[in-house]
Image (cartoon, rainbow, N blue to C red):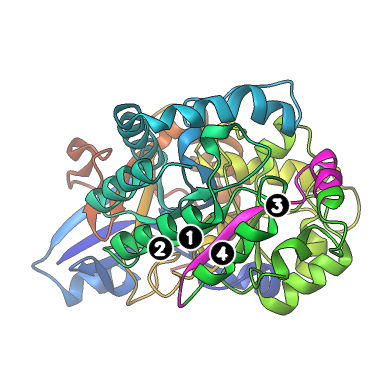
Amino acid sequence: MTIYRGAIVDTSGDPFIDGAQALRADQDGGLLVRDGRIVARAAFHRVRAEAPDDEVVTLAGGLVLPGFVDTHVHFPQIRAVGGLGMPLLDWLEKCALPEESRLAEPGYAAAVADEFLDGLLAVGTTSALVFGSHFAAAMDLLFAGARARDMNVTSGLVVSDRILTADLLCTPEAAGQQSADLIDRWHGQGRLKYAVTPRFSLSTSDAVLSVCGELLDGDITFTSHLNENPAEVAAVVSLFPHRRDYLDTYHQHGLVTDRSVFAHNVHATDKELALMGETGAWASHCPTSNSALGSGLFPLRRHRAHGVGVALGSDVGAGTGLFLPKEGLQAYFMQQLLGADGSALDPVQLLFLCTLAGARALGIADRVGDFSVGKEFDAVWLRPADGSTLAVNLRHATDPVDALARVFALAAPSDVAGVWLRGAPAATTSSSHLAGGPWPPVPWPVRAGLS
């Protein structure tokens, strides 16, 4: 067993409902981990008293947070970040789809899979709903790499039968057979789950969407794009004149359920939000992508008002990086721009959106998303360099909420000092950081009720 000692911060509930009471902060906390699972959590001195002989890993000088959960990120686009100045459909044509076509070559796909998975771990993302490749062989490489790293990855073959270039298209029969084969090989292996993944209704006919509905069984996830861009929405409406709205193109095939995660949904109607709320479907908010492509301001409070769960996605490559706290900061900015309608986000909500909300969206909150006893120890240690602006600000934080605010405002990927997957350090974690030693100053003053 191992005791992890540090300033341990997580959300035990939904702060949009529970307010600041959802925050748990132990400024000198201890997590006792056995075989990858948390078996005790309390102030460090109490955990140490219960396990006096066990190894102590001291994670000082920053915050220990649950591993981040990215609910929308494109594996084939890790080399396509930075295509600025274009709206969605132009960006797809000029940047994303040409890169996705290159994954037909296995050697290229293998290199991209390694870059993608290592990139996620390097920024503290331990769980992700990954928008996959159009090529089954590339999906095998992604799943194999994720399992070797013990990551929580939910992904699937991307299927389309129109609009896109010919090499990215498949027949309904091929979509069904190749997806079923991948499910047999990978779903439930280690920490892997399968996601039925039509690219979007714009590129997917009723015939393929019907096949997707047939595949959605048991605990299989569904994901696709929805209401991202006005031109995209108009094109979908013209292709499906017999459907009520964009969401209805999926709903008619049984694809809107509590296992569905729809990326973007910037231009949702109230009817669509009402259906998502009734069925328990989730929205993945991708703030930097929405900003970079000029897609619009995501109506987070309207989603919440209709009972729609929201989590965060980086949407790389349209998004500007994999580091999820940056998405949290951009989400904060965008909600501020919506004006005086109660849309402002607070730091506790931002942490929830990066962690537990995503775990709930992916159906893995029974295992990860916070540091409750019984859950797996997936964690990220944010420790800024001594003398950095973030380190200075953490020393002057007045309480854990203030410390979180400064993390979201200032943290960068370089501040990720360690990442753990079920208690095992990821390859990005340097053992030189993990030595014991005296406990340095905590990042906020001692206050009643915080540990």
Q: Secondary structure at mark 1?
A: helix
Asked if labels 2 and 3 touch by Cβ distance under 8 angstroms, the answer is: no
Q: In the rendered view, would you say 68 is above or below 296?
A: below
Most foreground residue, 142 or 168: 168
Task: Please give the label number shown on residue 211.
Answer: 4
Residue at (35%, 29%) from the top-left corner?
105
Separation (CA) of disc 1 from disc 3: 16 Å
Q: Earlier in the sequence, mark 3 or mark 2?
A: 2
Q: Earlier in the sequence, mark 2 or mark 4?
A: 2
Most foreground residue, 248 or 447: 248
Task: Please give the label number shown on residue 201.
Answer: 3
Residue under label 2 = 180
Which residues fall within the magenta stretch? 218-236
Separation (CA) of disc 1 from disc 2: 6 Å
Residue under label 1 = 176
- Residue type at the position of mark 2: Ala
- Residue type at the position of mark 3: Ser
Q: Residues within 10 Å of mark 3 (few under 14, many from 20)?
A: many
Q: Earlier in the sequence, mark 1 or mark 4?
A: 1
